[in-house]
Image (cartoon, rainbow, N blue to C red):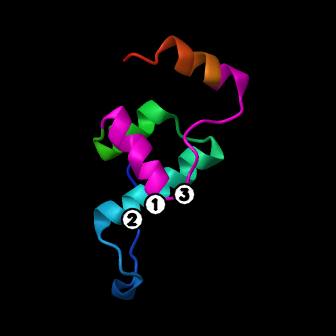
């Protein structure tokens, strides 16, 4: 899906920064997976995790399934 949003110039974000904000919010809400977020932004897992930290979004959740997934894939 492609979404176009017209923002006022005075919001102080370029297109990539706005996209990061949206992806971080969707990830935090549980709507977007880590892989989807990486794909949307063209980031590696590590860069995605750093981006989340920059936006004060926790990478790990308390969902046991997410934790089990991370443990199984921690070396990727």
Left or right of 68: which side holds 46?
left
**Relative to 46, is 23 on the left or the right?**
right
Residue visible at 43% across and 42% down in the picture:
49
Specify whether residue 61 is painted magenta. Answer: yes
Residue located beneath label 1 in the image? 21
- Residue 37 in the image: state x and y as whole percent: 42, 41
What residue appears at the point 46 percent right and 18 percent down from the top-left corner?
Answer: 74
Residue interval drawn in magenta:
44-66
Which residue has dot 2 on it?
Answer: 18
Tell me the quarter of the picture where residue 70 sits.
top right
Q: How many neighbours does mark 3 have within 10 angstroms: few (below 14), some (14-19), or many (20 or more)? A: few
Query: First in sequence: mark 1 or mark 3?
Result: 1
Q: Residue at x 71, y 29 (%)?
A: 63
Q: Earlier in the sequence, mark 2 or mark 3?
A: 2
| Count of marks placed on residues | 3
Disc number for residue 54: none
Callout 2 touching callout 3 (CB < 8 Å): no
């Amino acid at each position: 899906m492609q979404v176009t949003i017209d923002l006022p110039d005075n919001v102080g974000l370029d297109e990539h920064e706005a996209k990061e904000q949206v992806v971080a919010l969707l990830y935090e809400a549980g709507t977007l997976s880590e892989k989807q977020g990486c794909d949307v932004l063209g980031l590696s897992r590590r860069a995605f995790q750093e981006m989340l930290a920059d936006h004060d979004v926790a990478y790990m959740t308390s969902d046991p399934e997410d934790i089990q997934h991370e443990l199984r894939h921690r070396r990727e």
